[in-house]
Image: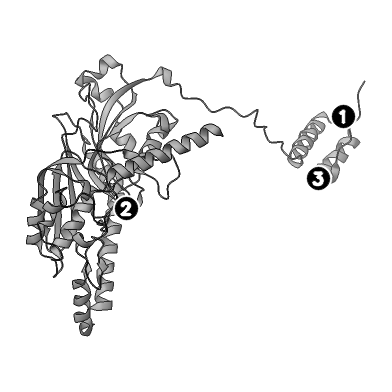
Amino acid sequence: MSTKQTSDYSNWSKEDLIAKIKSLEAPHDAASSVTTTESMVKDQAASTPQIKQSSSQKKEAKVFDWSKHNTRFVALRFAYLGWNYNGLAMQFEQTPLPTIEETILQVLAKVKLVPEPLDEVQFSRCGRTDKGVSAMNQVISINLRSNLTPEEQTLEGNDLREIDYLSVINGNLPPDIKMHSICLRPPPDFDARFSCKSRHYRYLFKKTNHLDIDLMNQAAMYYEGHHDFRNFCKLDGSKQITNFERYIYRSRIIPLGGDLYCFDLQGTAFLWHQVRCMVAILFLVGQQLEKPEIVLDLMDMTKYPTKPLYEMANDKPLVLYDCEFPAMEWHTADNYHKFTRLHSSFRELQYDLAIKSQMSDIMSKVLFDNKQEYRDAIEESLANSVPLGDGIGRGFAGYTPLDKRQRSEDYETINTRWMQRRGAKRMIKKDS
C-alpha cells in the first residue's frame, strides 16, 4: 500500500514546475520522471534547514597518552627582555603581566613537551629575577618528552634522532624570550639553582655631569668579600631569612662606550632586591651625597643594626648577565637555517626598538636643543636630584643623610609578625 506525499511547490523553479507538468501528462516517460524526482529531492534538501550535529555526536579530541612516551632530564639556557613581564617566577594567582616561566611552560605544554596542569610541572631555576629585570643566560632544569629510550639518551650518537628542542620551543615563544642553548646530559644530581657556582649581574646607567664615576667605583669595591647585606635588601617575612651574609667575587663600575656605564657584579647568591639596593647607594655616592665609606658603615651591624629607609634603583637597567656552572656540554643552534630562523624572529623586535630610540632622540632635539636659556635650570635640577636608573631620579629640597633617616624594623620582628599572621589565618581557616 502506497502513501501519497504532498510536495511544497512554492520553492520550485519554473523549469522544474514545467517538467513536473510534462511528467504528469506523459507518465510513460520514466527517465523524465526520475530526473524530475532527483531535482525535487535536491530542491527540497536545499530549502530544508540543516540540523547541526549535536555536541555528543562530535568526535572527541584525541587525548595525548603520556604513558607511551619517554622523558629526559635537560638543562635549558635562555635569554629574555623582562620589561613586559611580571618577573621570572610563575605565580599561582593572577598577575598584571604574564611571567617568563608562565609563558615558557605554556609553550612547552602546547608542543606536548610537558604534561598539564602546569602547576604540577617540576623544574628548577638558576636565579629568580623581579618584574622588569632581564636575563641573558638564565637556566632551568626540567624533564621534557623524548623520542629516545633512557638507554639511547646516554649515547651522543643518538642526538640527531632526538626532538629538536631549541627549534620547536623557539618557534612558539614570543620574540623577547629565546632559548639559545641546551644540555642534553646534565650531571645526574644537577639542579639549576643549587649547582650554580656564581651569578653575574650588570646594571646599566648613563653618566651625567653630576655623577662621579671614580667615587662610585671606590664604593663598589667595598662590596667585595664576605659581608652581611641585610641593609642592602628588602626584608620579607614570608621568606623567613635569618642569614644575610653573602660573598661577592667582583664589584666594579666599568665603561661600555660613550656615556654608558655599568655596575658589574659577581657573587655566589643574592638577596631579594639586593643588587638594586647596592646600586641605589652607589648613586648617592656618585652624586656626592654620601661618602664611599657609607658602604662599609652599612655592612657594620654596630653602626647600622637596621636599614635606613631609601629608594632602590629602577628595575629595567638590571640584567642577569651570566650564571656559572661546572663544566657541561651545551649545544646551540647547530646549522645555518636554524640560526637564521632564530635571528629573524628577533630581528623585528630589535629593529622596532632601534627606530623608537632614534625617534625619541629626534624628538629630544626638536623640543630641547634650541632652549639654551633653560640650560642652567636643567643643570640645577639634575644637581638637586638622586639618580635611580630611570633617567629621572628623585628631586629634593634638602638631602637627609642616611644616618639621620628613619630605620626599618629588624628582621626578627618582621619574621615573627609574619608567622603570627600566618598562624592566625590558619586558625580562621580551621574554624570555618
Q: Quadrant of the N terminus?
A: top right
Q: Which residue is mark 1?
A: 28
| Pick the front one: 129 or 333 | 129
The answer to whether the residues at label 2 and label 1 have Cβ atoms under 8 Å apart is no
- The answer for how far apart the CA atoms under marks 3 and 1 are is 26 Å
Which residue lies most toward the front here?
Answer: 302
| Pick the front one: 322 or 410 | 410
Spot occupied by residue 401 in the image (x, y as percentages of width and height): 19, 64
Please report the residue visible at 15 percent of the width from the left and 68 percent of the height from the top. 208
Place residue 388 in its image quadrant. bottom left
Q: The disc labelled 1 sits on which kind of residue?
A: His
Mark in the foreground, 3 or 1: 3
Instruction: Please report whichever mark, 3 or 1, sits nearer to the chain's N-terminal start.
Output: 3
Q: Which residue is mark 2?
A: 83
Q: Is residue 156 rendered to the left or right of residue 10? A: left
Instruction: Please report whichever mark, 3 or 2, sits nearer to the chain's N-terminal start.
Output: 3
Spot occupied by residue 352 in the image (x, y as percentages of width and height): 30, 58
Q: The disc labelled 2 sits on which kind of residue?
A: Trp
- The answer for how far apart the CA atoms under marks 3 and 2 are is 63 Å
Place residue 381 in its image quadrant. bottom left
User: Label 1's element?
Assistant: loop
Please report the residue visible at 21 percent of the width from the left and 85 percent of the height from the top. 373
Q: Residues within 10 Å of mark 3 (few under 14, many from 20)?
A: some
- The answer for how far apart the CA atoms under marks 2 and 1 are is 84 Å
User: Label 2's element?
Assistant: helix
| Pick the front one: 233 or 243 | 243
Q: Residues within 10 Å of mark 1 (few under 14, many from 20)?
A: few
Q: Which residue is mark 3?
A: 11
Tell me if residue 244 comes above or below residue 64 in the rendering: below
Q: Quadrant of the C terminus?
A: top right
Tell me if residue 231 comes above or below residue 76 in the rendering: below
Tell me if residue 383 comes above or below residue 50 in the rendering: below
